[in-house]
Image (spheres, grey):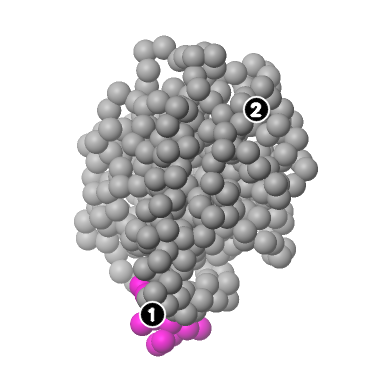
């Protein structure tokens, strides 16, 4: 669609809260929504907060420059959880992002506006970021495809940081093919789409033992049906894999926001301020140990998956909470955070179900995006036959 058509659709669905601002750019497209964490020349990058809202970006982020070279047009800046530090995109300054499948529920975060815009067909695809699940959680909750590439694949220059060690930029789209082409436009990767989609029997897929523990029954039922017949694989416990990533995230985010926390703490929403203050309490020793544990976690995951193309894991432990309701952060991000720790590429796919969307993560080996795309295309095709 053209950028003008996309903006018209966005204005008609303004109640979703998917956008903080719309551009005046025009062109044949693809029309892309950019998470308002990423610099687009001439627009304010709010990062979902109010500390930056008077500063218009002078130049595009490197990833946006690459998108323009590929012919993409930025149609708007997508809403997000404040400073990308949350899982619901209930933003105290710009309003909550509502789930297109149930407006009383959250869209997930922090790239909630990007996921909602794609699900509601307000753009061709969207750009998001992922530090603890921020592409995959909203993809799961909104029923779209979210692609978190291997850490470092897409440049973060011009992207307001949350955790410099973990931040990852990637696309959200309605199908795997579009997501793969979008990632090529954003990065130096090429040839992600195979000449032929393999059958599931040609792939080495598995599910990790014990990783369904803690998943609520509705999600467990969908996951079990979608993965029936797959062998189990011994992978380190998800809490063990996720813990160093959480410590690194807290410490680096707290350090980044220290001055604002000291000078104007009242300008933060209560949930984000509490997390940032928690980050300030992480000791140097604990941070250093977490970095060491992260290296060990990467080696352990890579060793466990040495003979596997991909593993399948639930994207979240609970269905999307209602807006304003209390929820357990670990029950949302406990299945995504481990792969921020390890840095592996992950594609979140909508599972075959007739109710609210349920996402399943397809986790590939470090730097093996092309094989991950093959596995995801095969699963997408197989699951389409179930729902179709």
Q: Where does label 2 land, which residue?
A: 227
Viewer-proximal residue, 221 or 37? 221
Q: Residue at x 42, y 58 (%)?
A: 293
In the image, which is nearer the foreground, mark 1 or mark 2?
2
Q: Which residues are magenta?
A: 253-268
Q: Which circle's residue, 1 or 2, is located before the other in the chain?
A: 2
Q: Secondary structure at mark 2?
A: loop
Indicate yes or no whether the magenta region holds residue 265. yes
> Residue 305: percent from the left, percent from the top?
46, 34
Q: Which mark is residue 258?
A: 1
Viewer-proximal residue, 242 or 289? 289
State which quadrant residue 306 falls in: top left
Q: CA distance from mark 1 to mark 2?
A: 45 Å
Residue lying furthest bottom in this view? 263
Q: Residue at x 47, y 80 (%)?
A: 281
Residue 266 is at least partly visible in this image: yes
Q: Residues within 10 Å of mark 1 (few under 14, many from 20)?
A: some
Q: Residues within 10 Å of mark 2 (few under 14, many from 20)?
A: some
Q: Residue at x 49, y 19 (%)?
A: 203
> Residue 110: percent from the left, percent from the top?
51, 56
Q: Residue at x 47, y 66 (%)?
A: 247
Residue lying furthest right in this view? 217
Residue 26 is at least partly visible in this image: no
> Residue 171: percent from the left, percent from the top?
42, 40
User: Would you say the residues marked 1 and 2 are in contact, meaning their CB atoms lie under 8 Å apart?
Assistant: no
Q: Is residue 215 above or below residue 158?
A: above
Viewer-proximal residue, 12 or 54? 54
Quadrant in which the N terminus appears: top left
State which quadrant residue 150 falls in: top left
């Amino acid at each position: 669609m053209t950028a003008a058509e996309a903006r018209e659709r966005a204005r008609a669905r303004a109640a979703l809260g998917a956008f903080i601002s719309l551009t005046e750019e025009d062109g044949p497209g693809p029309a892309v929504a950019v998470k308002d964490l990423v610099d687009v020349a001439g627009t304010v990058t709010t990062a979902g907060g109010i500390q930056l809202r008077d500063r218009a970006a002078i130049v595009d982020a490197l990833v946006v420059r690459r998108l323009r070279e590929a012919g993409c047009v930025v149609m708007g800046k997508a809403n997000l959880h404040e400073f990308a530090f949350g899982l619901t995109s209930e933003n105290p300054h710009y309003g909550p992002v509502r789930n297109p499948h149930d407006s009383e529920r959250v869209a997930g975060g922090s790239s909630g506006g990007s996921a909602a815009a794609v699900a509601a067909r307000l753009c061709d695809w969207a750009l998001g970021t992922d530090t603890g699940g921020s592409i995959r959680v909203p993809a799961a909750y909104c029923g779209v495809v979210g692609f978190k590439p291997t850490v470092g694949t897409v440049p973060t220059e011009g992207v307001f940081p949350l955790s410099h060690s973990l931040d990852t930029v990637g696309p959200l789209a309605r199908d795997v093919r579009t997501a793969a082409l979008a990632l090529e436009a954003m990065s130096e990767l090429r040839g992600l789409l195979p000449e032929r989609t393999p059958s599931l029997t040609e792939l080495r897929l598995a599910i990790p033992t014990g990783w369904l523990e803690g998943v609520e029954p509705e999600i467990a039922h969908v996951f079990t049906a979608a993965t029936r017949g797959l062998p189990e694989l011994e992978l380190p416990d998800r809490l063990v894999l996720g813990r160093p990533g959480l410590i690194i995230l807290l410490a680096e985010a707290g350090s980044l926001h220290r001055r604002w926390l000291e000078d104007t703490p009242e300008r933060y929403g209560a949930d984000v301020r509490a997390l940032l203050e928690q980050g300030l309490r992480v000791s140097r020793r604990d941070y250093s140990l977490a970095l060491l544990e992260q290296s060990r976690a990467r080696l352990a995951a890579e060793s466990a998956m040495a003979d596997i193309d991909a593993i399948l894991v639930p994207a979240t432990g609970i269905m999307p909470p209602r807006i304003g309701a209390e929820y357990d952060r670990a029950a949302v991000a406990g299945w995504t955070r481990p792969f921020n720790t390890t840095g592996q590429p992950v594609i979140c796919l909508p599972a075959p179900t007739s109710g609210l969307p349920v996402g399943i993560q397809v986790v590939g080996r470090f730097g093996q995006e092309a094989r991950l795309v093959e596995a995801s295309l095969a699963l997408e095709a197989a699951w389409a036959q179930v729902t179709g």
